[in-house]
Amino acid sequence: MGIQVQRTETQPLPAGLYAASIDSVTQETGKFGEQLKVKFLIEEDGFEGKTLTGWASLTFSPKAKLFGWVKAAVFGGREIPDSYQIFDADHLIGRRVFLSVDTAKGDNGEVWNKIKDLLPYRVAKAQPSAAQPAKPAPSAQRAPAAKAQPTEPTDWTELDVDTLRDPGPTDEDEE
């Protein structure tokens, strides 16, 4: 008996936002020449194990797709400092992002997913449930507490690039 391969059907994800991590980045020749091929692993319930592939040109400038992807994945949405002059694909591996996914129809009529954008990964804080009542509102007689504003350096060029990179979610973020 020869080699047998089971027939499979692939279903595209519904359009929307999906938490994902970057599994691999390779340089390949695509239909538009040399490009980066980025493989994303979907982390959403019900879609575990599903992967999506995105392509970006080998251009690292503010108008290029790759620049926006690095800004979202490596720098958590912050501006990329001028001191980050050389993109290294290893900086993307393992990063968590949100993928903005759409569907498109190919010339053959097959529906497929298209990655519209990468957004910085943010862990949403748990909302109180019915079993856990919300904290009572502060008394009207007390002045509201001032919210602490995160301070950011004003001169990014004085910092080491490694200190600017978003380390990704921590155990504290996932509580």
Image (cartoon, rainbow, N blue to C red):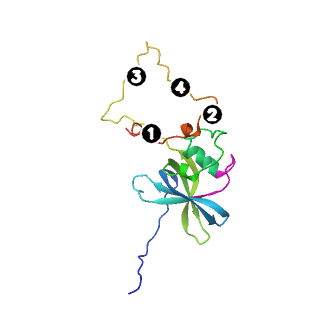
Which secondary structure, mark 1? loop
Q: Amino acid at mark 2?
A: Trp
Q: Is residue 141 above or below residue 75?
A: above
Depth check, mark 1 against mark 4: the one in front is 4
- Label 1, label 4: how far apart the Cα atoms are: 18 Å
Residue, x 55% and y 44% (percent of image)? 74
- The answer to whether the residues at label 4 and label 2 have Cβ atoms under 8 Å apart is no
Task: Look at the image and give the residue range highlighted in magenta.
Answer: 54-65
Which of the 4 image quadrants contains residue 127?
Answer: top left
Residue carrying label 3: 137
Residue carrying label 4: 149
Residue carrying label 2: 156
Residue, x 69% and y 48% (percent of image)? 61
Q: Is residue 126 left or right of 56 when viewed as pictured?
A: left
For the N terminus, give its image quadrant. bottom left
Image position, residue 54 (x, y; %): 57, 58
Depth check, mark 4 against mark 2: the one in front is 2
For the C terminus, give its image quadrant. top left
